[in-house]
């Protein structure tokens, strides 16, 4: 073991002008900066990266898809799907049928489907057709007190409630997948769910859409985020109590590496470049991002906000 409701016509896309931003390297990802109410690019690769100027501003809320190609953004009470972000040329499209004032979203692994959720109303909607023709399903009540949320490419929603983890499929009643209290994070990967419970259990739920089977993997103190690597061979688990990221080999189902951190991690968010993950967004004006590079050798990097900071 080694020590991120306006009905629209199909042909209509609204392009909002943005100030040109200076780019002097590859785009590693995009993040929603809640302090600036904006989506900003991460420019350069770990070790020489920084958070660039505002790409899309004036937002009430936003969530960036895995890979950074698309995003959902709430602006002046309307939910939009954003395309063209990887080219730094955002195109805005109102999400047809959007009725939930979102403050949380989860994405399918490839970023074509999302679920939005309001912690105020307890309502959720599945968004399909991303990024080109985003449209929302009918709102579904899943409760105002969930602790984790996920969605797969078929639009099946997984939500962690007080008494366990539930599968919510279109046109079907909720199904209890696991009576695990306090699930903090869920990741979807090739027919399996990976979950982290508050008491530290890291578990796999195989064949969750049919005959669900729960398998234990490990125990990690105070897990706050987890993700499956792009090659599906490793599971990454962020531990707040340990200030570390635990890496597990999913072939042998054994510990593979442990990355110590200088500060508390948060949920793992996929960035644009393969196997780059946002561990923590900045909480203060001068605080850097914390980014995990998973492949080929796991490592953690600080990314300053602004060039030269």
Image (tube, rainbow, N blue to C red):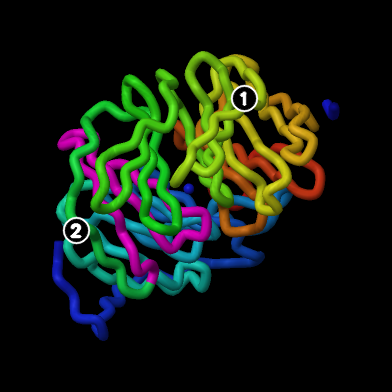
- Seen in the image, is 66 located left or right of residue 70? right
Residue placed at 44% from the left, 27% from the top? Answer: 178
- Residue 123 at x, y = what percent? 20, 42
**Residue 241 occupies which quadrant of the picture?**
top right
The residue indicated by pointer 2 is 98
Residue 291 position within the rendered picture, expressed as x and y whole percent measured from the top left = 63, 41
Q: Specify the quadrant that holds the N terminus.
A: top right
Indicate the position of residue 97 as horizontal and vertical percent values: 17, 62
**190 horizontally vs 258: left or right:** left
Say which element carries label 2: loop
Residue extending farthest to the front is 211
Q: Residue at x 72, y 39 (%)?
A: 250
User: Is residue 87 shown in magenta?
Assistant: no
Q: Going 33% across and 63% down the picture, which residue do you hit?
A: 128
Mark 1 residue element: strand
User: Can the viewer see residue 227 in this picture?
Assistant: yes
Horizontal side, residue 26 vs residue 264: left or right: right
For the residues labelled 1 and 2, the Cα–Cα distance comes to 38 Å
Q: Is residue 284 above or below residue 199?
A: below
Q: Mark 1 — residue?
A: 216
Residue 287 visible (yes or no): no
Specify whether 118 is left or right of 195.
Answer: left
Tell me what residue is drawn at x 33 percent, y 50 percent: 115
Residue neighbourhood size for the residue with mark 1, other residues' Cα within 10 Å, grouped as few (<14), some (14–19), many (≥20) = few
Q: Where residue 202 sits in the image (x, y, percent)? A: 59, 25
Taking depth in this image into account, of 189 and 281 the one nearest to the observer is 189
What is the magenta range?
103-131
Question: Looking at the figure, which quarter contains the C terminus?
Answer: top right
Viewer-closest of 165 and 2: 165
């Amino acid at each position: 073991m080694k020590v991120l409701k306006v009905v629209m016509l199909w042909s209509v896309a609204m392009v909002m002008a943005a100030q040109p931003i200076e780019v002097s390297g590859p785009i590693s990802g995009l993040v929603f900066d809640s302090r600036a109410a904006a989506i900003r690019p991460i420019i350069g690769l770990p070790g020489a990266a920084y958070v660039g100027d505002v790409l899309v501003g004036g937002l009430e809320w936003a969530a960036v898809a895995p890979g950074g190609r698309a995003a959902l953004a709430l602006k002046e009470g309307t939910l939009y799907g954003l395309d063209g972000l990887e080219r730094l040329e955002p195109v805005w499209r109102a999400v047809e049928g959007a009725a939930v004032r979102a403050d949380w979203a989860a994405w399918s692994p490839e970023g074509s489907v999302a679920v939005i959720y309001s912690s105020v109303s307890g309502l959720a909607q599945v968004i399909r057709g991303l990024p080109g023709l985003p449209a929302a399903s009918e709102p579904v009540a899943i409760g105002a007190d969930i602790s984790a949320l996920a969605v797969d490419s078929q639009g099946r929603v997984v939500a962690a409630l007080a008494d366990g983890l539930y599968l919510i499929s279109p046109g079907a009643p909720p199904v209890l997948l696991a009576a695990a209290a306090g699930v903090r994070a869920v990741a979807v990967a090739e027919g399996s769910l990976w979950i982290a419970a508050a008491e530290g259990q890291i578990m796999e739920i195989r064949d969750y859409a049919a005959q669900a089977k729960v398998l234990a993997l490990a125990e990690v103190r105070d897990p706050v985020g987890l993700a499956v690597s792009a090659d599906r061979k490793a599971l990454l688990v962020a531990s707040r109590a340990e200030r570390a990221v635990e890496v597990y080999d999913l072939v042998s189902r054994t510990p593979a590496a442990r990355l110590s951190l200088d500060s508390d991690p948060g949920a793992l968010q996929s960035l644009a470049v393969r196997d780059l993950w946002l561990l923590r967004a900045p909480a203060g004006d001068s605080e850097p991002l914390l980014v995990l590079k998973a492949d080929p050798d796991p490592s953690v990097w600080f990314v300053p906000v602004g060039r030269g900071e």
